[in-house]
Image (tube, rainbow, N blue to C red):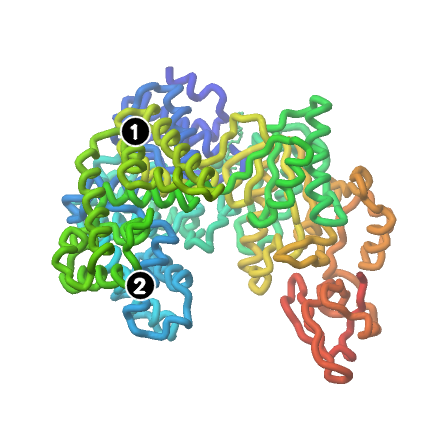
Amino acid sequence: MPTDLLADLTDEQQAAVVHGEGPLLILAGAGSGKTRVITRRVAYLLQQGVRAGSILAITFTNKAAGEMRQRVDAIVPGNKLWICTFHSLGARLLRQYADRLNIDKNFTIYDVDDRNKLVKDALDATGMDNTKFTPDRLGGAISKAKNQLLTPKQFEQQAHDFFSQTAAKVYHGYEKRLRAANAMDFDDLLYLPALAMRYNEELRADLDSRFKFVLVDEYQDTNSAQYEIARRLSLNYPNLCVVGDPDQSIYKWRGSDIKNILDFERDFPAAKVITLTQNYRSTKAILHAASTVIDQNKHRKKKMLVTANPQGDPVTVLNFNSGLEEAEGVVERIKKAVAEKRNHYRDFAIFMRINALTRTLESAFVKHGVPFQIVKGLAFFDRKENKDVLAYLRLLVNPDDTVSFLRVVNEPPRGVGKTSLDRLVSYANRNEISLMNAAGSVAKIPEIKGKASSGVRDFYRIITDLRTQLEHPPHELIAMVLDKSGYRKSLQDSTDEEDADRLANIEELVTAAKQYYDEDNSRTLGDFLEQITLASDVDSWDETADHVSVMTLHAAKGLEFPVVYLLATEQGLLPHERSLAKDEDVEEERRLFFVGMTRAMKELYLCHARLREFRGQAMYQVPSMFLDELPPDVVRQDISQDRNFARGAIDEWRQKAGYGNPNFLPGPAERPRKMEPTGASGDPSEFFVGAVVQHDEYGIGQITDLSGFGALRRVKVRFPAAGEKTFVADKAKMKVVK
Ligand code: ATP
Ligand code: MG
């Protein structure tokens, strides 16, 4: 019954769910039920008799897609509708419409490492100075160009500086190599479908009528290519429903454009706009704290968010002496809460701005025997041995795959040295054939002799033989690869202890493939490979297990947890130091902080440490400017409960740092920028690298460098807002506060 679907929704939410045809924009704040509404709407459309095949729902991660599928399935079972990310949509479209697009459907998807290899090759081939720019940087520029749907020619036309001109040249060669390898990079999965829909009207119209209803979650983080796809799928059947929250746009660095959501009404003038104003996730205290912070962003439409949830505990700022104590302190608190039966481990999430901070945390978890999962991509598949085996598998599906060929032709060793390989490559290039084909005719290449020649021939045979077995399930194929390639044997024969580990890992790969196949027997080796390549960090997260979840703020998007700890809310880390020079970048960091805060349902802890070891250096840290933006009435400073916490010391430090009130409880940290000028300059002989200083004009900062002597002595200081400044030491109007 349709009414069941609506029973636990507010009027606003219901209106969005039952909206008939025509464009629909749901612009709403964090935790207001956007994802719930879009999921319900899919189920509702099905109930209304819309064919499953004509609905396309797009989520931000594969994991979110899986969840949406489960929810929809629970309401309206057994529907084969497309719920996927933009990237997996692209991959599916390219394979399904391969003939019409004139591509080979067995293409390999290249990750950033693979990409960089081809970029390097293309760069070398230009004959330009290849030491100026790294392949990664050039690859990044190409990626950006593709996300803006610029072809190599178009990119070249607008390349006016030396770097862009280099990138443009490389882009040409890179594309050629990519096509020759029958490979797609991540960006191609959006770029090619978007261009196809732009220039192939017949195909576009077919797809538009195939997917009559298109729904997109997290629309605020779409880039130009994604936007083009969503829009062009919705011209004849403009039933595009997008939901998003501009305050949660956090992927600008990957090309997302907040304009896509802000301009929706311009692109679809007939759009119905629904705003959801009630938050169901968080307590009043958390919501108020988060709203107050995000309100500091100047470039934003003001938005109301209220909740009927209880007031809840104040948001707590936890101060620690060091990063080490922070890790210990947080883990101990969690352990205590579980011991006192207040929570399960799975209620907790720990977020941080950058992955590098997890190491300290990991040791604390291990030491205290607290179960945890660090949500950090599929490190398992990044191990050398697994990448080798995957390269074999890719070659089976796509023998033109250059990168994979070069990776495993001599793995395990077959006597194919670098010189022979270079000869093989130039033979292939001369004859415009793939490396695999060249390997097939190695007998015709006189420069490759003896052991190298037979090695190449053996490799060719192994791959060709295995290719006749492609109809086997993925795990059986992997087992065959391990045997036939000699890979397993070479590990078994090795006396190196690590090889025993490697062996265990590749056996684990077989198990992973088996599990994948057992879930659905129609899955092929190609599907298995694609799923691994397209997985994002959060896809590896197991939310059902009873452990503490640790992840970056970016990965936390869309999720919710009863208790959230945000680590290292310190100037330079959050906001990240790279962002400090530009207001708009600081605003993006503030959105990231906001995303983190709004994941919390009941309790929110914002932690910072005074001393943090980071990039091999111990640094005095200044609390994040965002902490100063918290509203005093819902925030508590808590310095008393932490073990080893030298309260006297920190109070002294605070006093020196100008925080004024030695008790400091309750109340927010005062913003360093607001501090009174000291009037006099301090004693320059006290300056040392790492010292926290207070400058008359720029406030609190940290000395990053000292040079010269006497009157020439210079001091470089990094300020949270003003960035890095250099002063003559004798004249610097600042003094050391710690
Ligand atoms: P985000 O901006 O973080 O993506 P969202 O707007 O997508 O959040 P949801 O994740 O859909 O919000 O919902 C937040 C929480 O509120 C979920 O636990 C959801 O089940 C619950 N919720 C949403 N709507 C209602 C409602 N009408 N009644 C009760 N609970 C609701
Ligand atoms: Mg959501």
Amino acid type indicated by mark 2: Asp
- Residues 677 and 546: in front is 546
For marks 1 and 2, give the one nearer the viewer.
2
* Mark 1 CB within 8 Å of ligand 2: no
In front of the other: 377 or 641: 377
Q: Could you tell me which quadrant the N terminus lies in? A: top left
Where disc 2 sits, the SS reads: helix
Dot 1 amino acid type: Leu
Residue 610 drawn at (x, y percent): 74, 53
Q: Earlier in the sequence, mark 1 or mark 2?
A: 1
Q: Position of residue 564 (x, y in %)?
A: 63, 36
Q: Is residue 80 left or right of residue 26?
A: left
- Judge from the rendering whether residue 111 lies leftward or rightward of residue 104; answer left or right: right
Counting labels gives 2
Relative to 5, does residue 296 appear above or below in the rendering?
A: below
Residue 272 visible to the viewer: no
* Quarter of the image where one finds residue 487: top left
Look at mark 1 in the image and give the residue it sits on: 81
Residue at the farthest bottom position: 711
- In the visual, does 398 lie left or right of 529? left
Q: Is residue 515 left or right of residue 235?
A: right
Q: Residue at x 33, y 72 (%)?
A: 165
Residue 440 in sight: yes
Query: Mark 1, residues whose alpha carbon is within 10 Å: few (<14), some, or many (≥20)?
Result: some
Place of residue 489 in the rendered image (x, y in percent of width and height, measured from the top left): 35, 38
Q: Residue under circle 2? A: 121
**Residue at point 21% right, 45% down?**
204
Q: Does 124 appear above or below 514? A: below
Q: Residues within 10 Å of mark 2 (few under 14, many from 20)?
A: some
Give the residue drawn at x 34%, y 46%.
269
> Which residue extends farthest top?
1
